[in-house]
Each structure stands twice: as structure tokens, then as C-alpha cells.
Image: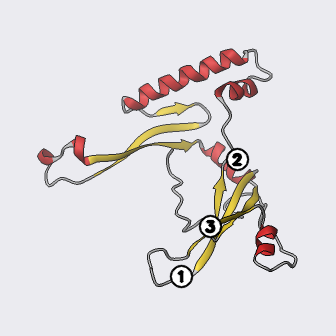
Amino acid sequence: MSKYKIIERKANPMNKQDQTVKYYAKPVSERALSTAQFAKNASVGMAITPKEMEAAIEQFSQYAMQMLLMGRSVEIPNIGTLRLSFKSDGAESPEKFNARTMINSPRILFRPKPDIRSTIMNSITYENAGVRAGGKDYPSIKAYTDAMGGGGSSSQGGNTGGGGNQGGGTSGSGDDNGGF
């Protein structure tokens, strides 16, 4: 289940006069597993020990870094592809282009395989992990409503749902969802 927190933000941050506030969903990520725990979980039911799996993951990581630094894409079989990307300032002519000063913002992008992406997009469900409003965190929509003096029954509809962009509402949230 993918957790989200409802965040209070200005509806139009570019317009200083407009003080309208809207509430957007922001993903809440759980702490990643350690490599050892990941290897232990991934090796269940296999003819490979967790230590061997951990060594293979470490070897793959080193290899992937080398390939990316050489400018090559790295395909992770049945999962997706990693590749480097960057931005660049323009030059008046090819002779005036200076890679050292004009290439910037390097990042690593991941493109999942279509079947992985569709499985996740069609199976994802959402769980509310609270509200952040007025600079304060509330553990639930009900706690927020109670603190605001609403006290009545608070519908938490939209907290769970499967597939696509349901339960989201992240457009305009300002989160960068591209790359790592």
C-alpha cells in the first residue's frame, strides 16, 4: 500500500496576491530495506544463500555504476533501464561550447519495463498517513478536522483505491517525480 500525506500549499505560488490554499497528496516513503535484508527476502525459496544474493547485488551495483559513468544505459532484466541525463546551457557555436561549464544537473533516470509499470499502476492502493497544514502535522484527517473545530464525522473517502491516478491529486504539488 502506498502511503500519502495531505499537504497544505498555496494554490498558485507564482501569484503573490493570491493566498488561496489547496491540499495536495504527497507520497510518504517507508525506509528502504538494507541490502542484507533485501537479499534475505529476495533469496527465499531459491538455491542461493542470502550472503550470495547480497554479493551479487553488490557486484551488480558496482558494474551498473561503471557502465553509467561510461555513458552506457544499464538494463536490469525484467525490471527496466537506468540511464544518465543532464541539462545544458547553449553556446553561440559548437566551437564555443564548454562541457565543463555548460553541462549541468546530471541525474540518473529509471524507465521500468512496460509489464512492471502496468502491474504496479493497475495494482497500487493508497493509504492516508496524515495531514500537514498550518505548519503542523496531524496523524489523520479526523485529527485535523477535530483540531480545526469540525468535530463531526469526517469522511475519509479517497484514502484507498486501486489503479492509475486514483486517490492522488498531486498535480501542482511541486514534487519532482523524475529520476533519482
Residue wearing tag 2: 119
On the image, numbered disc 3 is attached to which residue?
135
| Residue at horizontal 77 percent and vertical 67 percent from the top | 158
Whether residue 145 is situated above or below residue 160 in the rendered picture: below
Q: Secondary structure at mark 1?
A: loop
Is residue 88 positioned above or below 73 on the image?
below
Q: Which residue is at the front of the view, 135 or 86?
A: 135
Amino acid type of the residue tagged 1 in the rendering: Gln
When asked about the image quadrant of residue 157, the answer is bottom right
Badge 3: how crowded within 10 Å, few (<14), some, or many (20+)? Answer: few
Could you tell me residue 154's position as x and y percent? 83, 74
Q: Nearer the viewer, residue 139 or 174?
A: 139
Q: Quadrant of residue 136?
A: bottom right
Give SS at disc 2: helix
Count of marks overlaid on the render: 3
Callouts 2 and 1 close, C-beta under 8 Å: no
Which numbered disc flags the more N-terminal residue, 2 or 1?
1
The residue located at (52%, 32%) in the rendering is 75
Q: Is residue 157 visible?
A: no
Task: Quadrant for residue 169, please give it.
Answer: bottom right
From the viewer's perspective, tell me whether residue 146 is left or right of residue 21.
Answer: right
Mark earlier in primary sequence (1, 3): 1
| Residue 3 versus residue 149 in the image, above or below | above
Residue for badge 1: 19
Disc 3 to disc 2, how far (Cα)?
36 Å
Q: Kindly report the distance in space between the C-alpha atoms of the residues bearing marks 1 and 3.
A: 16 Å
At 64% across and 27% down in the image, what residue appears?
35
